[in-house]
Amino acid sequence: MSKKKWVVIAKGADFNKIADDFHISPYLARIIRNRGAVTNEEIDMFLNGDVSMMHDPKLLKDMDVAASILEDAIEAQVPMRIVGDYDIDGVCASFILKKGIESLGGVVDVRLPERIKDGYGINSKIITEANADGIELIITCDNGIAAAEETELALSLGMSMIITDHHEVPYDEIDGKKEYRIPCADAVIDPKRPDCTYPFDGICGAMVAYKLIMYMFENSSLADTVTDMKDLKEELLTFAAFATVGDLMELTDENRIAVKLGLKLLNDTKNVGMRALIHETGVDKGSVSAYHIGFVLGPCVNATGRLETADAALELFLADDPADAQKKAEELVKLNLERRNLTDVFAEQAVEMAENEYADDRVLVVYLPECHESIAGIVAGRLRERFYKPSIVLTDDADRNIKGSGRSIENYNMYDELNKVRDLFTKFGGHKMAAGLSMTAGSAEMLRKRLNETCTLTDEDLVEKMKIDIPLPIGYVNDSLITEIERLEPFGIANPRPLFAEKDVPVKRIDLLGNDRKVLKMKLEGKDAGGSTRVYDSILFDDAESAYEELKDRSSVSILYQPSFNEYQGRRLIQLVIKDYM
């Protein structure tokens, strides 16, 4: 029996009119409205968006200032250094800036922080290193918005600094009002700046970097010397899209356009390193989807920054020699396997502690001192999925201080909640759904107590909601409906594959498949609008054995389902994927 709450999304609109205007079915019109598209312009952008519909980079605060500084630095051949991050977003953002600046004639290198030695983002050590190396301009990407002190140090040493980031701007709450702390860099580009009027603040760090380079390409005379502009623009868009999916950005607005176009380009990418990674992971060439970025390719990129240094991933994408790229790709895949094995071990420990020691807590704070700090966020994500509670995993760093990563749920703004107890942290940052933190040794239990004391989550908030797009009898599912649903791809955060529901569906047969009995298959009977019946193949993957024991003697079942095509022996058959049941 489901422990989740089924909720029908009830956003109103004239679905028949939308259907007529855009030559789609009322079903598709309703789903698109459920995804937040309201106006005809938004609906058109959702269905037919192209690069021309993406927002103008000049709308980002300080974009013109940053571009002017960058142009002067390139013309003067000033040595520059990009300071990125060790995750997929930081690697892709660094790649975009390096390729873009070098194409314009700039002298630039990249410094990716090491997770263990440096921690997240730019720090004083990185700045003093840059100064000693003769660097005159530092450009951050996917970090920097919380680096006020570090920025002051860079400026005091005579260096210029451009910050490009997408994270929340730090603030102090004074008399109920937020006082934001924006670093005093020469330019600060972050769509989450309160004084930035950019129409969409949900872009990742790589997309911010992409916007800066696109602005340079469109507005700088230096762009006249770029000979392969079309190919370069497409390559950089591919990496912005790759990071958008990998960094779990919402696939709405221009993110949806970027990923939709980026996937097409990715499937025919000319980037030697990316081609090698696709080959080494076994993904079929030409079939790369958002799923593959999120669960196959992306984790390999992240694994380098988790267990070694992210330089390996950046070097892979910058590689020109196919043989060299293949070796680098093999190493990334090997590291990811090691990371997965480590994650399984500590996730099991975390679940056991949550069940036995913290079952009554509404915010899970689990201290695993031996856990590799690089996988704390993944383990926190496992806890959130298992218990549907905000989850933070803490571990010891190399100096025996505490580092942690958190993952949140819909009604808990993790950044704001951590800000309420920021006196406990030596450093913290993030956004609504995820955060990272550093603390002195011995603070773990205090953090757990205070977050639970300040927590206002209700019992209702702690029940995961399954959002139903349309209550639809399975008998109404046909080839044309599934084909139409495919127009909504790519699916991902904020644009999930549509979910349908029907009560009391007749069960004609039920079986467990596979040697490990991990798949439940049912034959379900549906009736269409004309009263004709048809039997549908349906499969369930989650906890199949328990579901079988519960359903084997029942004559009907209420289901949440996603219709899809199943290709089998050259035939294309309709299949229902069961996501939940009662």
Image (spheres, rainbow, N blue to C red):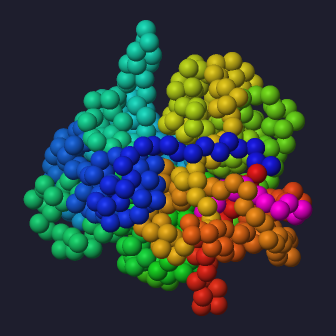
Vertical placement of residue 166 versus 91, above or below:
above
Vertical placement of residue 496 versus 190, above or below:
below
User: At x 36% / y 36%, what residue is drawn?
Assistant: 192
Vertical placement of residue 211 versus 147, above or below:
below
Q: Which of 167 and 305 lies nearest the eye of the viewer?
A: 167
Q: Which of 515 and 363 lies nearest the eye of the viewer?
A: 515
User: At x 22% / y 60%, what residue is drawn?
Assistant: 52
Q: Which of 204 and 20 lies nearest the eye of the viewer?
A: 20
Q: Is residue 208 visible?
A: no
Q: Which of 362 and 244 lies nearest the eye of the viewer?
A: 362
From which residue to which does the magenta span run?
Answer: 552-562
Residue 292 coordinates in the image, percent (x, y) = 55, 68
- Count the numbered circles shown: 0
User: At x 30% / y 69%, what residue is drawn?
Assistant: 234
Residue 244 coordinates in the image, percent (x, y) = 44, 55
Q: Is residue 581 visible?
A: yes
Left or right of residue 490: residue 302: right
Vertical placement of residue 423 versus 73, above or below:
above
The image quadrant of residue 156 is top left
Residue 558: in magenta span = yes
Residue reaching furthest to the top: 175
Left or right of residue 318: residue 213: left
User: At x 59% / y 20%, what residue is drawn?
Assistant: 421
Residue 357 coordinates in the image, percent (x, y) = 85, 32
| Majority secondary structure in the magenta region | strand
Residue 428 coordinates in the image, percent (x, y) = 54, 31
